[in-house]
Every structure is written in structure tokens, then in C-alpha cells.
Amino acid sequence: MTDTDIRALLGVFDRCQPAADDDIFYADVLTGLRELIPCDDITFQLMDVAEQRIRLLFVNDDGVQREETVGATDEFVQLFWQECWEEDGCAGPLTNGDYSTLLHHAEVSRTRAYANSPLGSAFAALGVKDEILVPMTPLGGTDRRLLLFRDEGAPDFSEREMAMLALARPHIAELHTRRDRELRGEPHLTPRQWEVLRQVATGASNTQIARTLGLSDATVRKHLENVFLRLDVQSRTEALARVNAFIDAA
């Protein structure tokens, strides 16, 4: 992996645009990653095993796609859940707690045992040749992962591409955490504004906040003015009521 690769990755994240409606992730980030690491399909997946619920945002040659399934909606999804916890299933990091190691299925998929397994046969029927699973630590009990697929005729994912995805993994997880907060209605404030609000929640005066954070009284007042504008409130009490559900996690 080169410095050019690193700059290109950072460029993808830097140009992250607001997500559409209730999308689970940022479609432009997936599109940018797909440009850097060509694949037939790149998918951001959320999976609730207890509810057998899967939410997908993916990009392929047809553009940005969205899908959600609960339970066995068709034969493939039924097979997916039946085999999920088997040796050749898709539980992956959920079984071993390793949420940092990328899984590259090129070699596994070529073994006779995998080819003869139910899921192996199903993926082969779909034309999938290679896959990378980029795991992330579950959020609120929900499994999070990025999946990249290449079909027959395409080369295997390279070590360079694996290294790029490993570098991108924590940034993707951080972006999803941000998106999850957006979907739950968390207001977009700067880290310093959150610090000021946490001090306000303790009952501290502007002077006390300034002393604690190493700021001037005037700077604290300005931060609070900007917070009130962003939250569309008129007082400290209203501001705290607006952010109460998020102030500890921010």
C-alpha cells in the first residue's frame, strides 16, 4: 500500500455527504470505496441475529440499493439463517469475538468441502467468486460488517486491497456510529460544544465552565450562543432537555 492509496482513502471519508432519508450508512462512502477497490458489489450490512433481521445498503452496477429482510423471506435467506452458526456459515466474528481481522474467502471458497456445503453451493450459483468481510464491533447488539464481492472472471482481492480495507475499517465503524446517532435524532454539535453542555449539566456557571475548560468567559458565552442556535432553543434548560438522551455518549 502506497501513500497515494492512503490519501485516496482519506479523500473518500473527507467527502462524506449527508445520508439519504433513513439509510443505515453513507452511500457516497460505499461508492468511493468501490472506485478504489473495484468489485461487483459492496455492501454495508446490519444484522440482528435474535430477530433474524438484516438491513443492507449496497452499491453495484445498478447504483445504490437498499434492502431489509426479517426472517426467511426466500430460499436463500432461509438457508443463510439455517447455516449461520455452522462452520461454513456467515456468523464469522460473532462466533470468535474477533472484530478486527478481515476475512478473505478466496482460498476457502475453492476447497471441495466449501463448494459442497449448502452456502458454498448457493453462492456459486449466484456467481460469487471472492468475498471480503470487514467486521466491526457490534453496536447495541447489532452486528455490523462491510462486504465486498467479486464474481467469476474477476481477479481475487489483493493483499494491497486487504491492507486498504484494514486501514479503513475503524473509520467505517466510526462513520456508522455517527450515522446511528443521526438516525436516533442526536444533534450535530462540535466536540467543544458537547464539553460545554456536559459542564452545564453539572450546574456550573459560565465562569466555572471557563475555568474547567481553560477558556475565557466570553468564549463560553459564544459556544452557548451557537449551541442555542443549532438546537433552536432559548435557554440552558431547553438545551439540556434536547440533548439529554445523547450527552453521556457524545
Image (cartoon, helix red, strand yellow):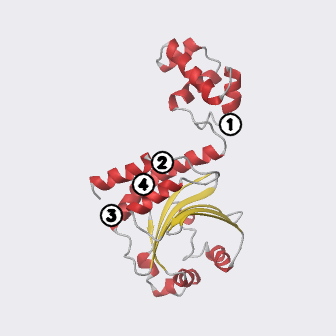
**Which residue lies under the disc numbered 4?**
168
| Side of 221 relative to 9 (left or right) | right
- Sooner in the amino-acid sequence: mark 1 or mark 4: 4
* Residue located 61% across and 72% down the image: 85
Categorize mark 4 by other alpha carbons within 10 Å: few (<14), some (14-19), many (20+).
some
Marks 1 and 4 sit apart, C-alpha to C-alpha, by 29 Å
Q: Are marks 3 and 1 in contact (CB under 8 Å)?
A: no
Three-letter code, disc 3? Arg
Residue 117, numbered circle: none
* SS at circle 1: loop
In the image, taking residue 120 as reference, residue 142 lies left or right, namely right
How far apart marks 4 and 2 lie (CA) works out to 14 Å
Q: Nearer the viewer, residue 122 or 9?
A: 9
| Residue holding disc 1 | 245
Reading the image, the residue beneath label 2 is: 16
What element does badge 2 sit on? Answer: loop
Can you identify the residue that label 3 sits on?
Answer: 160
Q: Residue 212, how many percent across, how many down?
A: 51, 18
